[in-house]
Amino acid sequence: MQHDIQGIGMTSQRTRDRLVERLREKGIRNERVLEVMRTTPRHVFMDEAMAHRAYEDTALPIGHGQTISQPYIVARMTELLLEHGVPDTVLEVGTGSGYQSAILARLVPKVYTVERIQALLTRARECHRLLKLHNIYSKHSDGSWGWPEHAPYPAIMVTAAPETTPPSLLQQLAVGGRMIIPVGSVSGAQTLKLITNTGNGFEEQTLDAVRFVPLLDGSVR
Ligand code: SAH
């Protein structure tokens, strides 16, 4: 975790502005999402040794075999979730570095996030505190089970890939709610899916080909 929020050189505001230009070129249109990406320091969520690469549009290692998602994917998934208006709450599965939840927390009133690796969650919480994001509620557990106490959710974002959509997450999706989730095998193809609870069932749209770390069972220290 980097305590220098401002950043210099490779982590400066100018470097961040260039990343946002790239996101725009790649097709991100939501101006609020772009502005939040521009003003949220991604380098804070990374180890010092990796911080100089924070504003490259790539996924990067955060330890424990996990990665911080690619900025384009973060922007894309956020934009999709907000396409039909701002939900009151979002459930995120896979806190990881805490970067995606930080982006969401600046766009929606309340974010719930679940992570199975305690060490990552502890670090993510420190970053959220440093950035004064007090509307993020997090829990150490296997997120395949969702977070039933606060369900149903108008929006769910899953940032690790299961082979099939976990039924508990479908159950916790409110009527009219949207879930964005990468589905597929680790070695083979994964696709981003947008699932809508119509009230009469679930409507599924298949979007981009993606590459996420796998959604795993159980939780670890
Ligand atoms: N949103 C994160 C992406 C992290 S990568 C970010 O912005 O950095 C995906 C994360 O999902 C990893 O931290 C991994 O430990 C976590 N994960 C995998 N399976 C999980 C599960 N069943 N429940 C909760 N978290 C899980």
Image (cartoon, grey):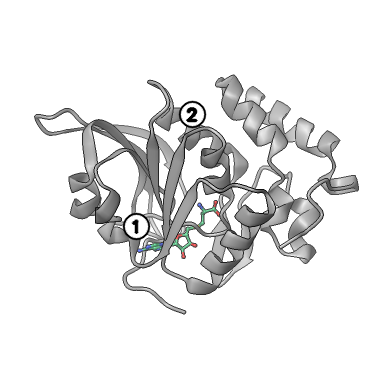
The kind of residue on which mark 1 rests is Ser
**Residue at coordinates 58% horizontally, 58% vertically from top-left?**
97
Instruction: Give the distance between the C-alpha atoms of the residues marked 2 and 1, in whole angstroms.
Output: 25 Å
Q: Is residue 71 left or right of residue 193?
A: right
The residue to which callout 2 is attached is 79
Above or below for 122 versus 88: below
At a point 52% along the width and 65% down the height, the residue shown is: 121
Does mark 2's beta carbon lie closer than 8 Å to ligand 1? no
- Residue in the foreground of this view, choosing between 205 and 35: 35
Q: Earlier in the sequence, mark 2 or mark 1?
A: 2
Work out which quarter of the rendered image holds the N terminus and state it: bottom right
Query: x%, y% of residue 208?
Result: 42, 35
Residue type, numbered disc 2: Glu
In the rendered view, does 19 fall on the left or right side of 106?
right
x and y percent of residue 195 in the render? 27, 35
- For image coordinates 29% across by 49% down, the residue present is 150
To which quarter of the image does residue 45 belong? bottom right
Relative to 65, 111 lies left or right: left
